[in-house]
Structure formats: C-alpha cells, structure tokens
Image: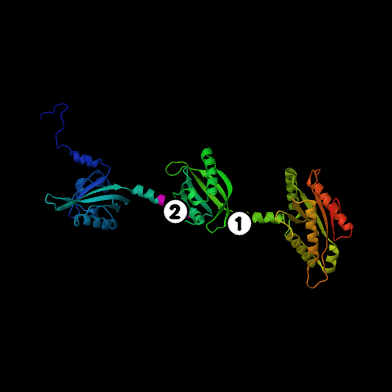
C-alpha cells in the first residue's frame, strides 16, 4: 500500500461543517421524528444525556428524563408535531443520568418535507438553571427586604440626584396618602409642601457633595393633617443605574417629641395652678429684660402676695386653700394679654411680667386684678370667705444692669403695700 505524501489530508469521510457548527453554538440542538424519537442531537445534548449519538438516535425522551417532566415535554412536542405550532417557553427536566433538575428556555418548531407535511421537530434549548436560581434568590431576597422595610416602624425612601423618588416603603405611602406606585418616579416637590421639599433637598445636596450621612429632626403634616415629628437619617448610595442617590430612613418620634414637650412644660409649670413656675418665670424675665434694654421699650413687673393666706389655710383647710390659689391664678390670667407672663413664684406669691408696659399701665392692671379678686366666690359653703391681695409694682429704669434690680424694686413695693395695711397697690417709686 503506498504511503501518503507528506502534508496530504488524511483519508476517510470529510467532517460535516454544519454538525461542527451546531456543536459549538452554545445551545442544546436536536431533532425528533413524529414518534418523538431522536434523529439528531448535538454535542451539548449528548453530554447532558450521558450517551453517544449512536445510542441516542431512535430513542424517545422516556429513556433520559423523569416522568413528570416527560408529561409537560410531550404536551409541548405534540402541539408542534400535530398542531404545527412554534412555541417558546420554559421547561424543567429531571435528568436520569445525573438526578439533576435543570431548567431550559426552549424553542420548538415543526420540520416539514417538500410538500409541507410535518415530518419532525427542531428543538433549540438554552440552560437557564443558574439564571433561574439567581432570579429566585433575588426574588426571595426582595420579598424579604420588602417585608422588613414595609413593617419597620419608619419611613424608608430612595431619591435620585434629580429629586425623583426611586423607592418608597408602605409607611411612606401611608403618610403621603398615595400608593407606592404613584410615588416612585415623581419629584419631591410634587408630593411634599414646597418649603419642606426644598428644605430636605438642600440637606440632600450637602450629602451628595460631601458623601457623608446626615441626621436631623423634621416635622411633617401627614395625610390626616396631623403634625408628626421624625428623626431623619440620610446616607448616600448609588441608584440601581449607577447615578447618585440618597436613602432616607425617618423614624416617627411624634410620641417621644410630645412627651419631651410635656416634660418641658411640666418642668416650667406650677402643678397646682398651671401658671409658670419660678424657674421658667425667671428665664423668661431675663430674656424680656435683655430685649427691653436692646430696643429701649418699657417693661414692668407686679409682685403679688395673697393676704393672710396662712390664716385661711388654718381656718378652712388646705384643700380650700388650693382652690383659692387656683381661683386667684385664673383671675390674674383673665386680665392679661398673651404676651404677658403670670407665674406662681412661691406658696401664695405671684409675679406678673408685662412687656411693653409702663408703670402707670402696670398699676392699672394691678388695680383691675385686685378688684376682681375681691369679688371671687371660691366656696359656696363659705360665702363669707373673701380674697384680698397686696401688689407691688415697678418698671425698668435706665440704670438697671440686670433683671434682679427690677425684681428687687417690685419686692420692696410689695412689702410697702403690706406694711400699709394690705389689699392695696404700691408702685415704686411714688407709692
């Protein structure tokens, strides 16, 4: 037998370039006849089935896939082979050779002869098992995240660099009174009052510029019209498309805020009469003193002492004494403007701070209170009980360096009123 020339092609059938191409397309390609038997399978199909081509040809899917998946596959194949449909859908196969459950995106179309009769089917499938697992994992994580964010006691949102909401949780939707789908994609100025939207946007811009988180307290009127307070924490984070964005988490601290305000009010309020107590009175008085000195406006003070209060307590008892204090406090309040401040500064001692009021006007106010207090009927069982009080009045003077000076003059005036027989007014100077 002659030897082949060096470099000559080897003898034997030439390789089929179309089969080589189908072996490299990266998809599972096969054909079957009308009975569902394989007439062709490319390399990926053979590797999946775990058999060579000569074993696979002429066999149907029952040799290679689990029965449950066979039912669905046979139904799809019948629609192509008998109905002439071209279908594209997801299929799940239990591979007998490996025991694996694999998911494919399959396209199936009929093969026809020259006369147009269906003689078989061409199938092209892409393995999407890992993609499907990843999608299921992402879906489950999203469901978990949505569940957490929708049930956390806070407003959670994401806003991009163009002031549009990218995300909002259910609490955010409830506060705005809109479904979530009507929030996402809209501008903050479309959903919030303009001043609030601009204030929040100014803070967001600082976060975009610095890349640092910020926290602050914000007040928002909710869909029901109630003023609510939130502790807002905002952090920078790129949006899903890579553009700059911020994530905000606002915790409702309305009850805490109201409790804090109530504690502050209680700390500065006399528990019996509801008037300001001595500490809060002094704080306000120092502030008003500074304001009057700065603007050159008058400021007056009335110091008051209910006459013979200890004797009243001893004769009628402390419960009635408390009612006397409350009745006198209400009498004083009824004679004053909103800008004035009435305080209980001691047991039966009161002070009234009168901004923008000179000595003569302050004396007239004191007289009205004195007359009104004298006509109070505190206890129907004791009609003979009458209240009287002594009043010391003083006004700011040019030489006063601190509120103490004004307070001291009003106190000396009160002492003079008591020395002169009580139930009277003494204005300093002048009587």
The disc label shown at residue 182, or none: 2
Q: Is residue 4 left or right of residue 316?
A: left
- Using the rendered image of the protein, determine whether residue 271 is visible from the camera's viewpoint: no
Where residue 27 sits, quadrant-wise, is top left
Report if residue 388 lies within the magenta region: no
**Disc 1: which residue:** 255
Where residue 85 sits, quadrant-wise, is bottom left
Secondary structure type for disc 1 = helix
Q: Is residue 148 above or below residue 384?
A: above
User: What percent of the width, then of the height, locates residue 100?
Assistant: 32, 51
**Disc 2: CA contacts within 10 A as few (<14), some (14-19) or many (>=20):** few
In front: label 2 or label 1: 2
The disc label shown at residue 157, or none: none
Q: Residue at x 77, y 55 (%)?
A: 352
Q: Residue at x 16, y 53 (%)?
A: 118
- Residue furthest out toward the left: 1
Q: Residue at x 45, y 44 (%)?
A: 239
Quarter occupied by the C terminus: bottom right
Q: Is residue 222 left or right of residue 120?
A: right
112 or 203, nearer to the observer: 203
Q: Is residue 178 left or right of residue 341?
A: left
């Amino acid at each position: 037998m002659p030897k082949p020339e060096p470099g000559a092609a080897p003898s034997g059938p030439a390789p089929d370039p179309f089969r080589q191409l189908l072996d490299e397309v990266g998809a599972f390609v096969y054909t079957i006849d009308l009975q569902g038997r394989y007439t062709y399978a490319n390399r990926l199909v053979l590797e999946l089935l775990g058999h060579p081509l000569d074993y696979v040809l002429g066999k149907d899917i029952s040799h290679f896939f689990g029965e449950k998946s066979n039912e669905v596959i046979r139904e799809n194949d019948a629609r192509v082979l008998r109905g002439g449909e071209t279908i594209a859908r997801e299929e799940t196969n239990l591979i007998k050779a490996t025991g694996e459950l694999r998911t494919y995106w399959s396209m199936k179309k009929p093969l026809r002869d020259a006369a147009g009769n269906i003689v078989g089917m061409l199938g092209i499938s892409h393995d999407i098992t890992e993609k499907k697992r990843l999608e299921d994992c992402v879906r489950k994580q999203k469901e978990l995240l949505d569940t957490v964010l929708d049930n956390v006691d806070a407003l959670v949102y994401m806003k991009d660099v163009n002031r549009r909401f990218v995300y909002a949780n259910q609490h955010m939707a409830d506060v705005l009174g809109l479904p979530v789908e009507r929030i996402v994609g809209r501008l903050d100025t479309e959903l919030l009052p303009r001043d609030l939207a601009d204030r929040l946007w100014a803070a967001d811009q600082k976060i975009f510029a610095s890349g640092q988180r910020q926290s602050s307290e914000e007040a928002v009127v909710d869909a029901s019209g109630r003023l609510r307070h939130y502790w807002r924490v905002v952090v920078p984070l790129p949006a899903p498309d890579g553009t700059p964005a911020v994530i905000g988490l606002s915790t409702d601290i309305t009850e805490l805020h109201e409790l804090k305000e109530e504690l502050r009010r209680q700390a500065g309020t006399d528990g019996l009469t509801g008037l300001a107590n001595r500490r809060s009175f002094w704080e306000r008085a120092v502030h008003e003193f500074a304001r009057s000195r700065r603007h050159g406006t008058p400021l007056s003070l009335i110091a008051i002492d209910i006459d013979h209060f200890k004797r009243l307590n001893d004769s009628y008892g402390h419960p009635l004494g408390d009612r006397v204090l409350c009745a006198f406090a209400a009498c004083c309040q009824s004679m004053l403007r909103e800008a004035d401040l009435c305080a209980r500064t001691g047991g039966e001692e009161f002070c009234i701070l009168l901004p923008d009021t000179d000595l003569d006007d302050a004396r007239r106010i004191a007289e009205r209170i004195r007359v009104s207090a004298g006509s109070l009927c505190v206890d129907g069982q004791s009609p003979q009980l009458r209240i009287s009080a002594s009043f010391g009045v003083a006004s700011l003077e040019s030489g006063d360096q601190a509120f103490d000076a004004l307070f001291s003059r009003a106190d000396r005036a009160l002492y003079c009123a008591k020395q002169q027989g009580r139930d009277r007014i003494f204005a300093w100077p002048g009587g």
